[in-house]
Amino acid sequence: MDNKAALYHAHIYYEPENRTIAEILHFRLSKLTKPGDSSPIHFIGQLRDSKVIPHPIPQFVIHIAKENFEAVLPIIASSGLRALVHPLSGDDLADHTISAQWIGEPLELELASFCPSRAH
């Protein structure tokens, strides 16, 4: 199994009015990021204060080791922020839909960005 297949990806969403909560969660999760393969969080991205297609509102991402998936989800949920969590399989459409799970209220993603354009 390659390293990518052993990772999950979480998009943690926030609105301008709860950015401080996102900053606190970001800091808390960054403390779980350590050098080496044994780190529960393999990567934590910057807070993005505007939408990044297919995500309709601000968010930041983390990569979670598969073996730490169940331990990290309650940390995300305890923030009260919503999150989309999915495997990194290489199939972006499936990862963001049928293979995904939501923490909190789901958002409508701009899924057309995953579909190839069709010539008419």
Image (spheres, helix red, strand yellow):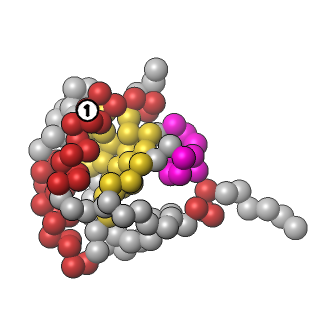
How busy is the neighbourhood of tag 1: few (under 14 within 10 Å), some, or many (20 plus)? some
Q: What residue is at 71 percent from the left and 57 percent from the top?
A: 116
Q: Dividing the picture into quarters, in which one does residue 43 lie?
A: top left
Q: Which residue is mark 1?
A: 68
Amino acid type, residue under disc 1 in the picture: Asn
Q: Dividing the picture into quarters, in which one does residue 19 lie?
A: bottom left
User: What is the residue that sits farthest to the bottom in this orientation?
Assistant: 17
Q: What residue is at 41 percent from the left and 48 percent from the top?
A: 101
Q: Position of residue 63 (x, y in %)?
A: 33, 42
User: What is the residue that sits farthest to the right in this orientation?
Assistant: 120
Q: Tell me where the magenta segment starts and ends, as one range.
A: 89-98
Residue sitting nearer the eye, 82 or 116: 82
Q: How many marks?
A: 1
Q: What residue is at 15 percent from the left and 70 percent from the top?
A: 20
Q: Position of residue 113 (x, y in %)?
A: 60, 62
Q: Is residue 118 left or right of residue 78?
A: right
Q: Is residue 66 left or right of residue 115?
A: left
Q: Is residue 24 left or right of residue 91?
A: left
In the depicted structure, whether residue 41 falls above or below residue 105? above
Q: What residue is at 40 percent from the left and 29 percent from the top?
A: 6
Can the viewer see residue 53 in this picture? Answer: no
Q: From the image, which quarter does the C terminus lie in?
A: bottom right
In the depicted structure, whether residue 33 falls above or below residue 53? above
User: What is the residue that sits farthest to the top in this orientation?
Assistant: 1
Residue 79 drawn in magenta: no
Q: Position of residue 51 (x, y in %)?
A: 41, 71
Q: At numbered mark 1, what does the secondary structure look like: helix, strand or loop?
A: helix
Can the viewer see residue 84 in this picture? Answer: yes
